[in-house]
Amino acid sequence: EGSLSNHIQNINNELVSAISLLELELDFSEEEVEFVSRKEFAVRLQKISETLERLVLSYRRGKLIKEGLKVVIVGKPNVGKSSLLNALLREDRAIVTDIPGTTRDVLEELIELQGNLFRIADTAGMIDSNDIVEKEGIRRSERMLEKADIVLAMFDASRKVDQWDEALLARLDTKASGKRIIIILNKIDAIDSEIDFASLKKEENVPFIEMSVKHLQGFVQLERELLLAANREISTCDGDIVLTNNRHEIALKKALESLKHAIASVNLNLSQELIVVDLRAALDYLGEIIGLTTSEDILNEIFSKFCIGK
């Protein structure tokens, strides 16, 4: 419907209007005429800057909507990561055996839950290994962990929490700090009542789900937690306008940077020429998205609002 173009065109018009004021002041510099106070002008530019910032921030939401949230399944070998991926996909995508370390690379697939896309990644088991292939798989797993939007940390209910589980919890603190983490205690059908899992539940505001992937228990709660995370990550921005194009985001970031330079120059009471240079640069970056703004547009703005030459 052109809502993004219209929104950016409005920002463009605000910049054209601001530049026209400075250009006019330059034409009357000998008379020392000030058409707008520096304080008012800085406030005006700051409002434009805030509008651009909201638009730039919307790109992450747009990317999540378009490409899906990155959900990474992590845990030591043989806790059921690949089985969980297969169960979520409802197909045998990953090889599942009783042999630890079957998955040596990252497997990634898309699923859809109530209109939300999730990019689910099954990773190599995180445990120290001398095997060069396993070590590379673990390195890739850690890299995926850093890129994740949601982390599903899996543990085995049939075994005591060991040093590798503790190491994973430590990894989450460093590699996944600030991310949405969901702890999954799998194999509850084989749980030993004497085992204490208090260390896994100590994290505040971290959902703890008891599951049996084998018997498809706990999936309703897991899907609910994934949808809650999606609703929090993907929220509508101002005017429901969301960027989805990386090229647009880059252009808007450059426009915002130029605009902030202009605001700094205004606050330092620097000359109009320096301010205009930055504002025109911001205008050029917006022009990469909606088409170029010419000097004629600025002249038309001047003549439409001011009586010149009488």
Image (spheres, grey):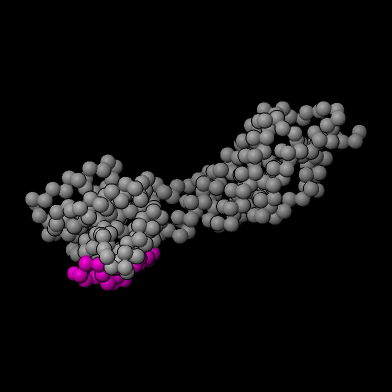
* Residue 155 falls inside the magenta stretch: no
Quadrant showing the N terminus: bottom right
For the record, the magenta segment spans: 89-115
Please give the name of the residue rendered at 72% of the width and 27% of the height, measured from the top-left corner: 37
Instruction: Give residue 35's position: percent from left, percent from top.
Output: 77, 30
Instruction: Give residue 31's position: percent from left, percent from top.
Output: 85, 28
Instruction: Give residue 239's position: percent from left, percent from top.
Output: 54, 45
Q: Is residue 215 above or below residue 36?
A: below
Considering the whole magenta stretch, tell me its main secondary structure: loop
Residue 165 visible in image: yes
Q: Which quadrant holds residue 15? A: top right
Please give the name of the residue rendered at 78% of the width and 44% of the height, measured from the top-left corner: 298
Quadrant showing the C terminus: top right
In the current view of this chain or complex, which residue is farthest to the right? 310
Q: Nearer the viewer, residue 275 or 127?
A: 127
Instruction: Give residue 244's position: percent from left, percent from top.
Output: 53, 56
Q: Nearer the viewer, residue 90 or 109?
A: 109
Please give the name of the residue rendered at 27% of the width and 65% of the height, measured from the top-left corner: 130
* Residue 91 falls inside the magenta stretch: yes
Please give the name of the residue rendered at 17% of the width and 59% of the height, measured from the top-left corner: 187
Q: Nearer the viewer, residue 10 or 85?
A: 85
Q: Is residue 103 above or below residue 143?
A: below
Residue 112 visible in image: no
Give left or right: position of 309 versus 297.
right
Give left or right: position of 218 versus 17.
left
Q: Which quadrant holds residue 217? A: bottom left
